[in-house]
Image (cartoon, rainbow, N blue to C red):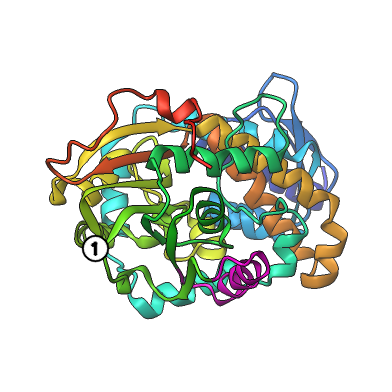
Amino acid sequence: MRAETRHILAEHALDRSLIRWIMRRVGNPNISIRLWNGDEFRVTEAPPVACMELCERRAVFELLLSPSVGFGESYSKGLIKIHGDFRAFANEVTFAITRQQNGRYYGPKIRSMLYAIRSNTLARSWRNIHHHYDIGNEFYKLWLDERMVYTCAYFDKPAASLAQAQLAKLEHVCRKLKLRPGQKVIEAGCGFGALALHMAEHYGVNVIALNNSSEQVSFAREIAAAKGLDNRVKFVEDDYRNIGGRCDAFVSVGMLEHVGLTNFTTLGELIRRSLKPEGIGLIHSIARSYPDRVDPWIGKHIFPGGHIPSLSEMMAVFEPQRFSILDVENLRPHYARTCAMWLENFEAVADEVAEMYGEEFVRMWRLYLAGSSAGFQSGTLQLYQILFAPLGSNNVPWTRDYQYLRESGSH
């Protein structure tokens, strides 16, 4: 055998060995691997759900450095391609990683604590929010529902469309808060304004809604003016830490993930100062089934500065302030479906997105949406709605019936 041939065979053997070692690190998903030379092999004996093609050898070394960042960046740049159903691929890999990490607790918890040392200052929070939410409203209009709700939908009916499920979520939150006409509501992190507008229009409350995103606040103000609600909803471009005044209800949907663990007690103190003694509050947040740091690729490219807390970590908002926890609901399957629908909508306009931002951006967001759906599907990610009240308040419901049965006079 010629020396050149032996060298090539040795390289192929080393490549396969490195890739199989990487696959063991991520739990041996049922996929096949195709190398840059056309060589293809299965990771397991089971039929593969998709094929991951490594277009260049350097993709192997990117994966060795970090399976998360290495895969995310290599896929976004086209060094890795996925052949087959992309969401099925994301589900399979995520389930494999979840199985691999089953039973591990203290290591991830320590990583979470170390990651939390980096505090989200006011300036850093603004930059982080700008990175994700100020991409441009035209982008989000392409694939969100008509109300531009960019949080978990609530599929109270199995066949509900995304728009119907988002409206059901707004209603679900309002019923939990037991809103009444004339009340004052503070909303921290209002997105594109759908909840604040819904509360004012259908429940007759007055809302102060804060958000760091200039693009989202601009959009919300336009809708409020068009609906004639700008006298009842005030959209403020500012950080939640600058909230002032008292309220009957405090609500935050999809903001806690951006607050940072070190600021949870600050948020709790702010809510305690804001909420009247007989008031009620709700925090809706993505969470983890156990403490850990945010996925490195997500933290670098999608949500810089973000931290997805476990339920125990979320208690840092409530326990130091002696809040009474009234209800904890997990909408995890609803978010898996929401992300899957977003991905379907996104794929339908991928060509338009590519014209706006380029192919690398499209691949990055495809991975983010598919990976998010897979995270909720696998149980790695949760979605909690936590209902709470100040210590000693007896203005609390006896049962949960009101959350699901529309009360007369609520509109």
Q: Which residue is painted at 41% across and 28% down in the image?
A: 402
The spot of residue 355 in percent (x, y) is: 85, 70
In the rendered structure, which segment of residues is drawn in magenta? 210-230
Looking at the image, which is closer to me, 155 or 203? Answer: 203
| Residue 105 appears left or right of 126 | left
**Residue type of the residue flagged with mark 1:** Leu
* Residue furthest top in the image: 46
Q: Which residue is painted at 63% across and 72% down in the image?
A: 225
* Residue furthest bottom in the image: 123
Looking at the image, which is closer to me, 28 or 249? Answer: 249
* Residue furthest front in the image: 409
Dominant secondary structure of the residues highlighted in magenta in the image? helix
The answer to whether residue 238 is above or below residue 188 is below
The answer to whether residue 141 is above or below residue 278 is below
The answer to whether residue 222 is above or below residue 343 is below
The answer to whether residue 43 is above or below residue 207 is above
Residue 17 in view in this figure: no
Q: Which residue is painted at 51% across and 58% down in the image?
A: 196
Residue 6 in view in this figure: yes
The spot of residue 404 in percent (x, y) is: 48, 26
Quadrant of the drawing holding the N terminus: top right
Is residue 67 part of the magenta span, yes or no? no
The spot of residue 117 in percent (x, y) is: 26, 63
| Residue 370 appears left or right of 383 | right
Helix, strand or loop at disc 1? helix
Give the quadrant of residue 108.
top left
Q: Which residue is mark 1?
A: 270
Q: Residues within 10 Å of mark 1 (few under 14, many from 20)?
A: some
